[in-house]
Image (cartoon, rainbow, N blue to C red):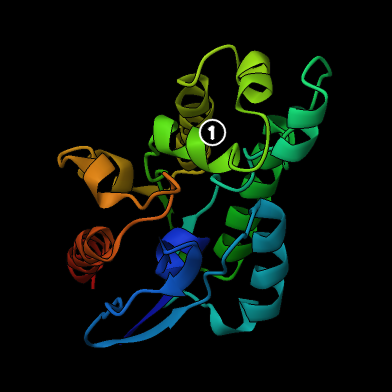
Amino acid sequence: MKNIRIFGDSVLKGVTYVDGGYHICKDKIKIESSDFCNFSKMGATTETALQIIDRKIDRCDENTIAVLEFGGNDCNYDWSKISDEPDKKYDCTVIPEKYTENFNNAVKKLKAKGATVIISSLMPISANKFMNFISNGLSYSNILKWLGEVEALSRWQSYYNDLALSVAKENGCMLLPLRENMEKYDYEELLCADGIHPTEEGHKVIHRFLENYLLSLI
């Protein structure tokens, strides 16, 4: 029996955004014939990933498949500060160089235990929905001034996706093409009003895709 360990953020945690609040969706990831644990955490970055892996590393061994899905929170900004002073320079939560370093370290920790590591590409976002969400109660025009254009949000998140793919390639990890699978659909319809969290239906699509992918390996 294979051990399946999921390390991710709210996307693989199953978080959805409805009526101004966050909820865990009803649909759950189910991997038959495996010892399955989902250690995903809402708001997690690669910094969080290292902490969680350190706590859970004893539950990983050469019989383990570990899925890593991080980046959406790493590339986020403090939008209230940007709204207040849009002419300043700001760093995101985890800058690209540190993101890559953290991700590499997470992979190495798991590989040192003998685990097979799979890196997930990032769930695509809706720039327009996300812009409306982050500017709610703040200055839309100031945030837009700092960004230059709304689509900059998608390009920046896509850059972090490229970094995740580079980490996978550098470490010889398998890739879970989550982003590519979601782009086969009208994925904006599968995103909540915040533009980043999947709807209940979106999570069903993700979960079935992940289940089929992992079941093909065990």
Picture coordinates of residue 126, whole percent (x, y): 38, 36
Q: Quadrant of residue 71?
A: top right
Position of residue 35 in the picture relative to residue 112 (left or right): left
Front one among 16 and 184: 16
Picture coordinates of residue 49, whole percent (x, y): 64, 61
Picture coordinates of residue 62, whole percent (x, y): 47, 74
Vertically, is 24 above or below 89? Answer: below
Type of the residue with mark 1: Tyr
Q: Residue at (51%, 33%) from the top-left corner?
A: 131
Front one among 204 and 8: 204
Position of residue 188 in the picture relative to residue 166 (left or right): left
Q: Residue at (15%, 42%) from the top-left corner?
A: 185
Position of residue 72 in the picture relative to residue 83 (left or right): left
Front one among 100 and 145: 145
Vertically, is 184 above or below 16? Answer: above
Say which residue label 1 marks: 160
- Quadrant in which the C terminus appears: bottom left
Instruction: Find numbered disc 1 in the image and state the secondary structure of the residue it sits on.
Output: helix
Q: Would residue 73 be visible to someone looking at this image?
A: yes
Q: Residue at (69%, 21%) from the top-left corner?
A: 142
Count how many numbered circles sit on residues in the image: 1
**Mark 1: few, some, or many residues within 10 Å (few <14, many ≥20)?**
many
- Quadrant in which the N terminus appears: bottom left
